[in-house]
Image: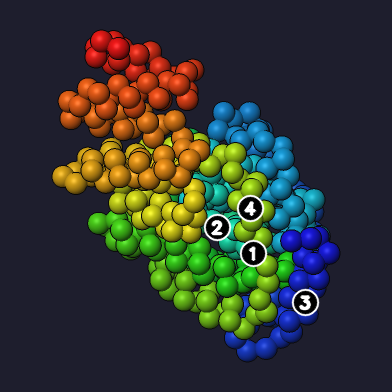
Amino acid sequence: MRRRQFLAAACAASAGLAPGPGRAEDAWVMPPRMERPDVATDEGGLWALMDREEAKLRRSPFAIRDAELRSYVQEIICRLAGDHCPDVRVYLVRNRYFNANMAPNGMMQVWSGLMLRVDNEAQLAAVLGHEIGHYLQRHSIDTFRDARSRSAFGVFLGMFGVIGLVGQLASVAGAFANSRGNELQADRIGLSLMSKAGYDPAEAAKVWENLLLEAKANPAGDPTKNSPMFATHPPMADRKDTLAQLAAALPRGVTNEKTWQEKTAPYRREWLNEEVKRGQFEESIALLSRLMQRSPEQPDFVCARADVYRMRSSDTDLNAALADYQAAIALGGEPPEAHRGMGMIYRQRDQPAETKKSFTRYLQLAPEAPDSAMIKNYLEELGA
């Protein structure tokens, strides 16, 4: 969408936010830019600690150092944050889980697992707006004080880190189980911000609808009821319904799906490979099946689902994997790994001719692949 059209949509959305019953955070007014608090105060000390964490993040091997992609996400943040734009610094992080967070000093992390799952700019804006809502309401300082009173400050600090987060989830859930009110307030503020920025507020509920689809595929069910990772969040179904009701009272806006897909396309295969390695087979199959339905012409999603089937390897999974690999190849432009995966299945089934054909094609497409030496050994075993 052209910039002039986008700005026009933003103005129209803003004009539609007159106070009224049922609207998303109508009475809320964006606060002025924050001054750096005195280091002797709780908040000032927390800012200083987050400054040090941010310095570590800049050097982290997990940071995605694509200036163009980072600038693109920063522009979305600026549309949402308004006058606070200069105070927010986004970092894109290689992490296969769905998450974004924002520290009180303006450091925001957006994880690759989230970027894989959102379908368009509007859905990303819903999540970013939620985090900006926490920031503008200074929720983190309340959480910090609560954590300190519970002797859980180390856990609090880990909420903003990258390494070791998963191992801290149970502790986080116990320490911060009282933050659902803040989560709901941030949802409402985020919805208001994305609508004012010209995005379609209906996309906010779809984020949680898609996550709920994955959660239902997991034998454990809704992670807001069973997983410590979401213990402080409202149940997904409730959250989705609330956001949908609030969005119904707001004007529609843009989604900018094509732009989002184009900007993230160079990372698609890398993020899909990370998802496959996550080892949550049922959730991954649900996610990838949804992505395939949305973009049936995209072989990367088909190949990734085949990889999940092959790794899970239940009674019918290998046949399903072969069918997906073949479908990915038929689409054209398939990842070389499609041929590798087929070769692994044929080798397991002792089908030497098919194994040789698949592995040979894999090496033709990816001669410098990290596992090329191993594949060549397999071919030598076959006398190729």
Q: Which residue is mark 4?
A: 260
Q: Do labels 1 and 2 touch, CB within 8 Å? A: yes
Whether residue 56 is situated above or below residue 374 in the rendered picture? below
Q: CA distance from mark 4 to mark 1?
A: 9 Å
Residue 249 visible, this orientation: yes
Which residue corresponds to the image point at 19% horizontal and 46% vertical from the top-left? 316
**Percent position (x, y) of residue 317?**
23, 44
For discs 3 and 2, the disc positioned in front in the rendered view: 2
Q: Which residue is mark 2?
A: 119
The kind of secondary structure element at disc 3 is helix
Q: Earlier in the sequence, mark 4 or mark 1?
A: 1
Question: In this rendering, would 307 be left or right of 60?
Answer: left
Q: Disc 1 marks which amino acid?
A: Thr
Q: Earlier in the sequence, mark 3 or mark 4?
A: 3
Quadrant location of the C terminus in the rendered image: top left
Residue 171 visible, this orientation: no
Which residue corresponds to the image point at 52% horizontal and 76% vertical from the top-left? 244
**Percent position (x, y) of residue 238?**
43, 73
Q: Disc 2 marks which amino acid?
A: Asp
Which residue corresponds to the image point at 65% horizontal and 38% vertical from the top-left? 54
What is the number of the mark on residue 255? 1
Q: Earlier in the sequence, mark 1 or mark 2?
A: 2
Q: CA distance from mark 3 to mark 1?
A: 15 Å
What is the number of the mark on residue 12? 3
Q: Earlier in the sequence, mark 3 or mark 1?
A: 3
